[in-house]
Image: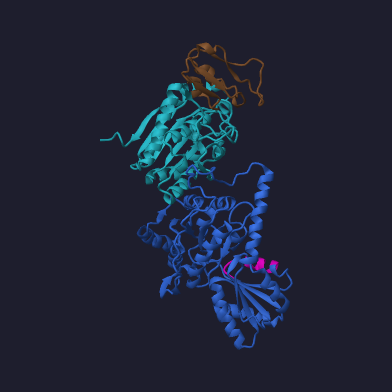
Amino acid sequence: MVVFEKPKALTDKVFHYCPGCTHGIIHRLVAEAIDELDIEGKTIGVAPVGCAVLAYDYFACDMIEAAHGRAPAVATGVKRSMPDRVVFAYQGDGDLASIGMCETVSTAARGENVTIIFVNNAIYGMTGGQMAPTSLIGQVTQTSPYGRDPKTQGYPIRVCELLATLDAPQYLERVTVNSVKNVRNAKKAIKKAFQNQIEGKGFSLVEVVSACPTNWGMTPQKALEWIDEKMLPQYPLGCYRDKDQEV
Amino acid sequence: MQEKTLMKGNEAIAEAAILAGCRHYFGYPITPQTEVAAYMAKKMPKIGGTFLQAESEIAAINMVYGVASTGKLAMTSSSSPGIALKTEGISYLAGADLPALIVNVQRGGPGLGGIQPSQSDYFLATRGPGHGDFHVLVLAPASVQEMADLTGKAFQLAMKYRMPAMLLADGTMGQMMEPVVLPEPKNPAAQPPAWAAVGTEGKRAHNVVNSLYLDPLTLERTNFERFQRYAQAEREETMWEEFMMEDAEICVVSCGITARVSRNAIVEARKRGIKVGMIRPITLWPFPKKPLFAAAEKVKSFLCVELNMGQMKQDVELAIRCKRPVDLCCRVGGMIPSPDEVLQKIVKANEQGG
Amino acid sequence: MAKLTFNEELCKGCGLCVAACPKHLLALSQGRLNQKGHTPVELTKPEECVGCASCAIMCPDCVITVER
């Protein structure tokens, strides 16, 4: 009996991601959620600009490539056009929290009934490792070569906490994928974010604290450990909004 | 046959869009076109359509892109500075071969400019509606009736050629009130096009709406194929109107409000025995090169009348291959030439004998 | 008894599965490369695998199929 296999909602296209890149795990969790909820035929995904720009090749559902940062606006258009479809956007930290921050906040504030998967690895991978809005103080990147200096380059942004100030969002949870236990929790959160949409409950976002071994300059396993050491103190795991739990 | 109604240009666009089967509008307030959004805000909820005031003009064009990806008619409207914000999104629409309508009710520029009318986005519409090699259909109304008629036409052509369309109106067209006979209503299409991202329903391979092609040969091929569609549009969809051109020795070229002003000037000039006529482009892309080239065989000179520093003038010169002199009568910043100003230019052209 | 199947050509030798296996049964191959030039992972003691699927859960590339 097969207890683990590649989900059907992923195509046969080989992932281009670096060895140990957590995009691979997160794509799989999204696909598992789509399989288990049996929604592939009515799901439409919106791909970002970033390492995951080719996500449109990896998911077997209909896919739309969006301009950088605009995936939530594109998802809004798709959902308003086809409210009975399941619409998700998959975005990195530049896409969601830098150029697209206005769209992120506004889509959340409108409570659009869409699902956003936010991959936060504190760096811009695709373009070669530049500073992200979520890069840590002191983090060395190509555009913060002396370490992120708060005086000139500001402080990192905590997206879940930010969006939790809005009335509309249904569900905001921060998870990570650096251990089997955490991957299992991340999957639960991602599945719930899709389930919420099916039930018409409104805006759901799962922030996945992720690794970028290549641009962090670490081995894949060390990068997962760095998540524990450095990322999680800045980005604590947990549920920041769940209207299901509110009295 | 519908009755005549007195409508403001901006509202005529909105109503005509709904009659054409558009059920999704995304906009942002900016003078002088906010009435389009206000009209849609009232009307769309009543017919089960979408009205959304987006967080920015950029978000609005991307919402249009989202609806267009599902194969449906979608529309946004703005004015010059807001249109500039949309150019990336317009390029994405073109690169993904999606139909959509962008309405530009032009105001004075550059920069924040003014709120009075202009035609200074001619280059933006015809040369640079976004980055990369592509065109958008550009339609230039000269009356509230055309604001209505060309809206429906724009949607029809956009769907036929799988490309964005821009309704390029000057500010006066948006604000003026005239009687209009609205078009017959059309229902939104029952089935999505085969290429649309609407959900596979497990019945087909997935559709991908995209403009990214990392392989240069493939990207080149998509560009070449797109331009073949553009060539067909140029052959079949060019629209223009001729006024008193049969024996004309001077050809006025103008659109929008300046075409109407020029008409008055031409009538007055004719009373003085000057043989002048007008070619009024209705599609700015595709541009009416053929009638202008033919006119260059007969007339002695051309006079462009536009609310910009001489943008359409360049297309006239290209169309006639610089065979005849092309003069310019222009006002900018929100000013509009009077019939007398245009008349003086016609008189001068006549005296110079071409 | 558990059975693991490895789609070796997908393996990028990242080693996440090696670290994840609670019984340390996985290791990157020595001196053997796949078509992409990576050192694919190997199950050193198949008889001790209980099919917990920790390796497959951590694998970013869907290399491993687990049967029990």
Q: Residue furthest front?
A: A1
Q: Measured from the top left, where is residue A194 in percent x and y?
A: 41, 37
Quarter that holds the C terminus of chain B: bottom right
Query: Chain A is shown in which shade?
Result: cyan
Q: Nearer the viewer, residue B287 or C31?
A: C31
Query: Chain B is shown in which shade?
Result: blue
Q: Measured from the top left, where is residue B15 in percent x and y?
A: 43, 65
The residue at the point 64 percent across, 80 percent down is: B245
Q: Measured from the top left, where is residue B30 in percent x and y?
A: 45, 59
Q: Which of the 4 image quarters holds residue A246?
A: top left
Quarter that holds the N terminus of chain B: bottom left
Q: Measured from the top left, where is residue B72 in percent x and y?
A: 48, 55
Q: Is residue A33 visible?
A: yes
Q: Which residues are magenta?
A: B306-318
Q: Nearer the viewer, residue B121 or A194?
A: A194
B161 in the magenta segment = no
B311 in the magenta segment = yes
Q: Which chain is brown in the rendering? A: C
On the rendered structure, is B250 left or right of A228?
right
Q: Which of the 4 image quarters holds residue A162?
A: top left
Q: Is residue A158 visible?
A: no
Q: Nearer the viewer, residue B3 or B300?
A: B3
